[in-house]
């Protein structure tokens, strides 16, 4: 089975800031990239695990992936509109 290679267009470093700032900054950052491109969000706030997927659902963007390594949450979101 082939694995799709995702290309990151922009990275938002939201490490060290607390809810709701990662989501607020993600909203601004996603408006700065073209439709169809991928925003990578790096966050250390555990609240972002629920907040980022909820934000994508409410805004119509695609939540692609979440991973967690060494205290850093990594989210991939595709801009849809």
Image: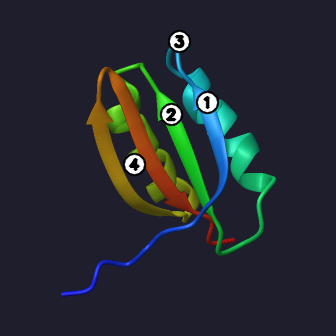
Q: Is residue 26 left or right of residue 75?
A: right
Label 2: few (<14), some or many (≥20) within 10 Å?
many
Residue to which mark 4 is pinned: 53
For the point 50% across and 19% down, the residue is 19
Report x, y in % for residue 47. 36, 24
Q: Is residue 27 left or right of residue 61?
A: right
Q: Secondary structure at mark 3?
A: loop
Residue to which mark 3 is pinned: 16
| Cα distance in 3D space between marks 3 and 4 | 19 Å
Residue to which mark 2 is pinned: 42
Are dots 1 and 2 in contact, CB under 8 Å?
Answer: yes
| Position above or below: 11 against 5 | above
Q: Secondary structure at mark 2?
A: strand
| Position above or below: 54 against 6 | above
Report x, y in % for residue 69. 29, 31
| Cα distance in 3D space between marks 3 and 1 | 9 Å
């Amino acid at each position: 089975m082939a694995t799709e290679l995702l290309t990151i267009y922009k990275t938002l470093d939201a490490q060290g800031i607390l809810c709701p700032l990662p989501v607020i900054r993600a909203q601004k950052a996603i408006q700065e990239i073209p439709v169809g491109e991928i925003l990578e969000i790096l966050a250390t706030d555990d609240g972002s695990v629920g907040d980022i997927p909820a934000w994508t659902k409410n805004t119509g963007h695609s939540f692609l992936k979440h991973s967690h390594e060494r205290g850093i949450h990594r989210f991939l979101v595709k801009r849809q509109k």
